[in-house]
């Protein structure tokens, strides 16, 4: 695989460590979210859809970090001396079952996260027409995801060696670009609606204050978008840091979506 600046085995170690740190943070955020939803509330008053989504995202994050640890152990310990080419070749081989599993979890978590943003966009706008384009874009992300995992599983040695210029890389770029565009559009519509509502309400207030909901929304959106942009930049530079950022995004999604 053509790469620059960072060996694949080092990238996998770095991504696993960073993912573990951020996973601990996401667990704390999850506990806080569930506490807010349930504290001094009756069962029927709990926002069950968001609670279920938050739980699902945490389960996916847990499954991903477990598989990532197994993937790391396989490459550096179990098959270190038996896999042709050593650890670097092992981590570059995309048809690996563990690699496909962690990729599928990443994709599923991305689709759930983007779907939540689109749903909240619908809730604040109260119009199905507003989310038609985001829904179409979400379907595009899903289509790119399926194709990406399929080509990962069918990749030849020559395609793996030229990852960033082969159809594997093209599908990765399409997936990252489409999910970034979907997130930016949906979050932008959501933020604009909240801003217009707050602007109208502020005319009836005697004391003007900040808009904490909008600030929190924008902070979360900027954080997630920055991570996706980092992935695209790494891809454009043919840098294996792409795989580090991808694993970091997994642990970022849970707290970010909970804030959205």
Image (spheres, grey):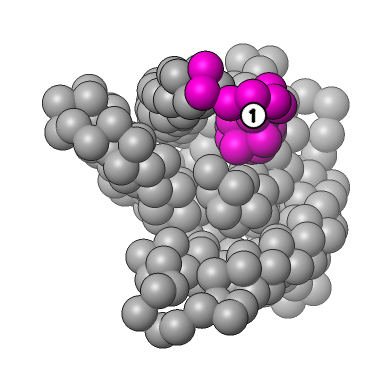
- Residue 206 x, y percent position in the rendering: 64, 24
| 6, 255: nearer the viewer | 255
- Residue 191 x, y percent position in the rendering: 49, 25
Q: Is residue 165 magenta?
A: no
| 145, 259: nearer the viewer | 259
Left or right: 187 with respect to 35? left
Seen at 58% across and 80% down, the residue is 40
- For this orientation, the residue located farthest to the bottom is 43
Q: Locate the N terminus and report the quarter of the image it occupies.
A: top right
- For this orientation, the residue located farthest to the front is 206
The span shown in magenta is: 203-226
Seen at 46% across and 54% down, the residue is 109
Left or right: 229 with respect to 112? right
Q: Main secondary structure of the magenta part?
A: helix
Left or right: 132 with respect to 254? left
Up the image or down, 35 lies above or below 216; here it is: below
- Residue 214 x, y percent position in the rendering: 59, 30
- Where does label 1 land, which residue? 211
| 259, 92: nearer the viewer | 259
- Residue 19 x, y percent position in the rendering: 75, 56
Q: Quadrant of residue 90?
A: bottom right
Up the image or down, 27 lies above or below 196; here it is: below
Q: Quadrant of residue 23?
A: bottom right
| 204, 11: nearer the viewer | 204
Up the image or down, 118 lies above or below 132; here it is: below
Q: Residues within 10 Å of mark 1 (few under 14, many from 20)?
A: few
Up the image or down, 193 lies above or below 53; here it is: above
Q: Is residue 213 magenta?
A: yes
Note whether residue 72 is visible. Answer: no
Q: SS for tag 1? A: loop
Seen at 15% across and 26% down, the residue is 129
């Amino acid at each position: 695989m053509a790469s620059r600046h960072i060996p694949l085995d080092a990238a996998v170690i770095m991504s696993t460590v960073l993912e573990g740190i951020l996973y601990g943070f996401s667990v704390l955020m999850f506990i806080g979210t569930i506490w807010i939803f349930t504290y001094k509330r009756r069962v029927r008053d709990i926002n069950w859809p968001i609670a279920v989504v938050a739980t699902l995202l945490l389960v996916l994050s847990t499954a991903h970090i477990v598989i990532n640890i197994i993937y790391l152990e396989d490459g550096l310990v179990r098959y270190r001396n038996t896999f042709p080419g050593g650890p670097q070749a092992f981590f570059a081989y995309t048809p690996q079952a563990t690699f496909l599993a962690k990729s599928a979890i990443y994709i599923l978590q991305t689709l759930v996260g983007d779907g939540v943003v689109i749903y909240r966009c619908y809730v604040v706008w109260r119009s199905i027409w507003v989310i038609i384009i985001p829904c179409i874009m979400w379907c595009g992300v899903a289509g790119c995801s399926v194709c990406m995992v399929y080509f990962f599983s069918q990749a030849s040695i020559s395609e793996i060696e030229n990852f960033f210029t082969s159809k594997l890389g093209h599908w990765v770029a399409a997936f990252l670009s489409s999910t970034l565009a979907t997130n930016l559009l949906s979050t932008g519509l959501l933020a604009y609606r909240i801003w217009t509502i707050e602007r109208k309400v502020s005319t009836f207030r005697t004391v003007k204050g900040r808009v904490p909901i909008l600030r929190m929304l924008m902070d979360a959106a900027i954080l997630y978008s920055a991570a996706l942009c980092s992935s695209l930049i790494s891809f454009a530079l043919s840098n294996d840091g792409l795989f580090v950022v991808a694993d970091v995004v997994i642990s970022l999604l849970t707290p970010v979506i909970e804030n959205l």
